[in-house]
Image (cartoon, rainbow, N blue to C red):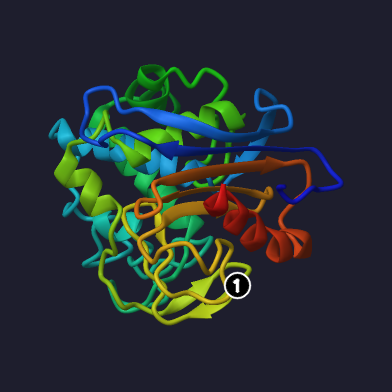
Amino acid sequence: MLTRFDFPVALIASELVGDAADARPRFRTLAEVGDINAVFPLASLTKPLVAWSALVAVDRHLLDLDAPAAPELPGATIRDLLAHASGVAPDATAALSAPRRRRIYSNRGFELLGQRLQEATATPLEEWVEAAVLEPLGLASISVPGSPAHSGTGSAADLSAFARELAAPTLVSPALAAAARRPVHPGLAGVLPGYGRQNPNDFGLGLEIRGAKHPHWTAAANSPETYGHFGQSGSFIWVDPVARRQAVFLGGRPFGTVHRENWPVLSAQVLAL
């Protein structure tokens, strides 16, 4: 039995049953709850989608992870923007720290990433994300019409397909995908929004790494290697490569106490399916 909510939600849990390196990786759906085709705001789940499109550009030699992030952030790189390690403030182009000293979760950092990605690809960001990620995966319900930090919308069905892409990449080279899913500049401390200061507060390239964080929105039973993201719209995506499980959650209520209390329980239930 999965936790029930008193507002509209859509959940999909799945399991990788084949080899992640197969040309056509095999997955098994474990649970579906709610209208999985309903479109919800993704909020910060937009970030992994944009990050994955940036990695496609890196693989195509259009974008360099070690290129400068912005003139206002001396020494910071594209890699630092993806890993929230550039030192830029959460919502303004101002350096609060030297690069790679603190984990400062930053919407502005992803907006700067979007600018660099547009310049590198000579393509409007929305069109690049669509061409690089959404169209190849058939994610017709998902769009990123504005900020690369939080403007996305989409369905649980399509978000689950993206979770499967993260678990068994087809669009990004194995080496680059592996780099995205492990800590970048490991050991940096910082605030995880909604959950307070974490030491360390590890992130990969656009993906949060669970590690030993507490409190956290996934379950204590999730492996430290679990990666994903959550959004202030009351949404999450996670992949546990040890358990070979993936879960996505979208809902009709902004992130709050009900999510903090129930998401870890729900994640534990998914692991037990």
Taking 214 as reference, is 259 above or below it? above
User: Which quarter of the figure has residue 165?
Assistant: top left
Picture mark count:
1
Taking 266 as reference, is 9 above or below it? above
Residue 11 in percent (x, y) is at 64, 38
User: Which quarter of the figure has residue 153?
Assistant: top right
Query: Looking at numbered disc 1 in the image, what kind of residue is underneath it?
Result: Tyr
Residue 84 in percent (x, y) is at 38, 63
Element marked by disc 1? loop
Instruction: Answer left or right for 220 relative to 81.
Output: right
Instruction: Answer left or right for 91 relative to 203.
Output: right
Residue nearer the viewer, 40 or 161 = 161
Residue at image position (42%, 76%) is 96
* Residue at mark 1: 195
Residue 169 in percent (x, y) is at 28, 35
Taking 64 as reference, is 29 above or below it? above
Residue at image position (22%, 53%) is 179
Visible residue check, residue 124: no
Residue 62 in percent (x, y) is at 17, 34
Instruction: Answer left or right for 108 relative to 38.
Output: left
Residue at image position (30%, 43%) is 116
User: Which quarter of the figure has residue 218?
Assistant: bottom right
Q: Residue furthest right?
A: 6
Visible residue check, residue 208: yes
Residue nearer the viewer, 52 or 178 = 178
